[in-house]
Amino acid sequence: AMPWQVLLDFDCLQQFLKSNLSPSQPASQQPAATPEGATLAISERLGGPKVEGLAAVWRQLDAELDFAPEYVDLIRTGRKQATSRWLPTEPSLRAVVAPCTVIATCLTCAAGGQVLGSLNITSVEKSTFGSLPDSLALMEGFSGGSVALKGALIHFYPNISNGSVITIFHFRAPAWSPLAYS
């Protein structure tokens, strides 16, 4: 099981749907209308409230971020403000586009998972694994530079190579979020 799950807000999901659903799809496969600004609640899989609004579409997307519990304090203190992902192993993350808000939970921090708070995805960029810079490693909380970042990525993605395209999600915690830092 992956330790984190991310839920997309309506605006983020709407951007994804516009770019990934064909206008020729039958009405039964199109998303139901949801009031502007509505947010998807914690998924049933986490034992939380039912998914509201675009429930069927959300279950199809099922986007998850796979942070290990050791990264939670780095996020809470603001020392981790980016995460690098290899999307061939996590294709649902293609739904996460900037700007949008995600709700992060740590599934292995407590029995049944724990809601950690909201994160604003501020930008998304791509790089190759072999060219990840030391500056990104610092944004991810690795004091050992890109060598340490690459070692962590190899741990999660053993088949990654220097030419693999990495997607980098930059984020900040909004002031009202439990994950906010000064």
Image: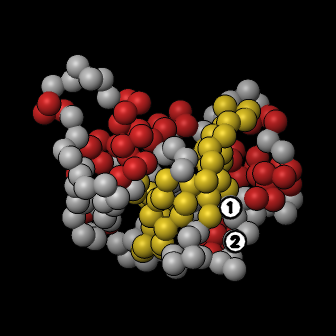
Mark 1 residue crowding within 10 angstroms, few (<14) / some (14–19) / many (20+): many
Colour setting: secondary structure
Direction left: furthest residue: 28
Quarter occupied by the N terminus: bottom left
> The disc labelled 1 sits on which kind of residue?
Gln
Please give left or right for residue 54 compared with residue 19 in the image: left
Q: Quadrant location of residue 70?
A: bottom right
Alpha carbons under labels 1 and 2: distance apart: 6 Å
Q: Which mark is residue 78?
A: 2
- Image coordinates for residue 63, horizontal then vertical, percent: 42, 48
Front residue (pair 156, 23):
23
Give the residue at x 21% y 64%: 50
Q: Where 174 falls versus 146 (above or below)?
A: below
Front residue (pair 110, 14):
14
Q: Quadrant location of residue 30?
A: top left
Q: Decide: marks 1, 2 in contact (CB < 8 A)?
A: yes
| Residue bearing the label numbered 1 | 81
Q: Where 2 falls versus 15 (above or below)?
A: below
Please give left or right for residue 165 compared with residue 111 in the image: right
> The disc labelled 2 sits on which kind of residue?
Gly
Give the residue at x 65% y 78%: 181
Direction front: furthest residue: 36
- Image coordinates for residue 66, horizontal then vertical, percent: 53, 55
- Image coordinates for residue 143, horizontal then vertical, percent: 85, 63
Residue 65 in view here: yes
Give the residue at x 55% y 60%: 120
Q: Quadrant location of residue 107?
A: bottom left
Quarter occupied by the C terminus: bottom right
**SS under mark 2:** loop
Give the residue at x 38% y 29%: 20
